[in-house]
Image: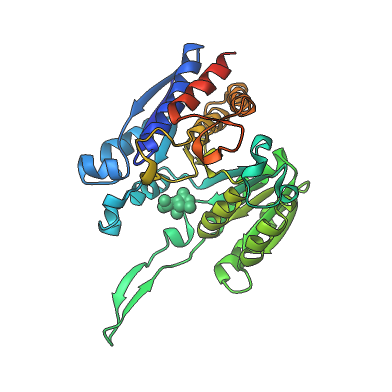
């Protein structure tokens, strides 16, 4: 049956990088991949089109699709809007409405880009970590939240960190299943020494671990995990953590690879439906200049094929094609170095398509 893909370019460099990922999908479609793509606005573009960062039609399209390809959201012109209609709410709304609770953020150091990391090569060479971030709960969504005025007239901001056992269990199962397919080593990151909510997190992870006796489960406090990520990142295989800790640690892990423009992500529901996006942002400063790196978005298509479309051979081919392009010395500005050939966004997309066809 034809699989439906919602294409949501978003803002900033989003439209440019998504266009290159669509080229890759079109190439696979020409070979027989049975897909249908429909585009819709989200984020700032959604706000401009309908007054909402997640327009009703966009949400409806996302709901009826088998997978979603998203570029990025956000831009200077929307920063002064009320928080309820800022572009980021479009993204958070999609995550919540579609129950995309399991966020997979790989941090892989491509051997061709070993020099791109700010860390010593021996610390990061061969790095391959998978961060599993809980994406629809925790302090991002906890109630009550807001800014209130106290009796003395002073304002007070407040948010709530909350996780129920079932929320922890389901992200735990996601992470353990991924660990089973990789190095069978899982590090759960919490702050159980201070926060009751994550004391429960730790307890539930221990319980879930009983279903996966082959996986070695370790616990680490988040402050230590941040330190260990920059000290000796190769000790990690799969990490699982809360929404906010995952937000922070995944940026840190991404930078270990030196090339945030290379890293894809998947946000999955309980049935394998997913939203796929590069982990970098909308980079409004370079938007429209044909300099952004489309590889993270193209690699997100590979994750889509693997996790939602059941086409892992095609996913492997895309990842291989990206390596071929890097081996040829082709580089966008963000990953460029001496002796390499600097090319633009659309040339990079074309190069991947050419490598795929070879
Ligand atoms: C991310 C981003 C988002 C988040 C923002 C844009 C809402 O930083 O996907 O990591 O905080 O989750
Ligand atoms: Mg983030």
Q: At 34% across and 77% down in the image, what residue appears?
A: 156
In this rendering, the count of numbered labels is 0
Q: Is residue 123 above or below residue 329?
A: below
Residue nearest the observer in this picture, 179 or 337? 337
Q: At 42% across and 58% down in the image, what residue appears?
A: 141
Q: At 30% across and 58% down in the image, what residue appears?
A: 83
Q: At 32% across and 39% down in the image, what residue appears?
A: 59
Residue nearest the observer in this picture, 211 or 281? 281
| Residue 107 screen position, x and y as percent | 61, 44
Residue 162 shows up from this direction: yes
| Residue 277 screen position, x and y as percent | 47, 39
Residue at the front extreme, as displayed: 339
Q: Is residue 161 above or below residue 178?
A: below
| Residue 343 screen position, x and y as percent | 49, 29
Hey, which quadrant is residue 262 in on the image? top right
Q: Is residue 294 left or right of residue 170?
A: left
Q: Is residue 94 left or right of residue 49?
A: right
Residue nearest the observer in this picture, 10 or 210? 10
Q: Is residue 207 above or below residue 345?
A: below
Hey, which quadrant is residue 153 in on the image? bottom left
Name the quadrant of the C terminus. Answer: top right
Residue at the bottom extreme, as displayed: 152
Q: Is residue 251 left or right of residue 62?
A: right
Residue 170 shows up from this direction: no
- Colour logic: rainbow
């Amino acid at each position: 049956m034809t699989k439906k893909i919602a294409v949501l370019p978003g803002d900033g460099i989003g439209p440019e990088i998504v266009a290159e990922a669509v080229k890759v999908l079109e190439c696979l479609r020409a070979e027989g991949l049975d897909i249908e793509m429909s585009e819709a606005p989200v984020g700032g573009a959604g706000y401009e089109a309908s007054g909402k960062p997640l327009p009703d039609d966009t949400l409806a399209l996302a709901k009826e699709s088998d997978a979603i390809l998203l570029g990025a959201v956000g831009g200077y012109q929307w920063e002064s809007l009320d928080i309820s209609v800022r572009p980021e709410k479009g993204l958070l709304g999609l995550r919540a409405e579609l129950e995309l609770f399991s966020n997979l953020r790989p941090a892989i150091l491509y051997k061709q880009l070993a020099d791109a990391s700010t860390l010593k090569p021996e610390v990061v060479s061969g790095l391959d970590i998978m961060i599993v971030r809980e994406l629809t709960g925790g302090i991002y969504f906890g109630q009550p939240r807001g800014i209130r005025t106290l009796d003395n007239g002073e304002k007070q901001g407040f948010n709530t960190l909350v996780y129920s056992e079932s929320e922890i269990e389901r992200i735990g199962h996601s992470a353990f299943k991924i660990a089973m397919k990789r190095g069978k080593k899982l590090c759960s990151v919490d702050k159980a020494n201070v926060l009751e909510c994550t004391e429960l997190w730790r307890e539930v992870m221990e319980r879930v671990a009983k279903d996966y006796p082959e996986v070695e489960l370790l616990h680490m406090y988040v402050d230590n995990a941040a330190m260990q990520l920059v000290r000796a990142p190769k000790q990690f295989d799969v990490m699982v953590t809360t929404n906010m800790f995952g937000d922070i640690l995944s940026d840190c892990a991404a930078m270990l690879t030196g090339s945030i423009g290379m890293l894809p992500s998947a946000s999955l529901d309980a049935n394998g439906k997913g939203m796929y996006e590069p982990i970098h942002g909308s980079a409004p400063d370079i938007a429209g200049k044909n300099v952004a790196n489309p590889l993270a978005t193209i690699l997100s298509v590979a994750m889509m094929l693997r996790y939602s479309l059941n086409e892992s051979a095609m996913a492997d081919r895309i990842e291989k094609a990206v390596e071929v392009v890097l081996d040829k010395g082709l580089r966008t500005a963000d990953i460029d170095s001496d002796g390499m050939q600097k090319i633009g966004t659309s040339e990079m997309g074309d190069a991947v398509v050419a490598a795929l066809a070879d």
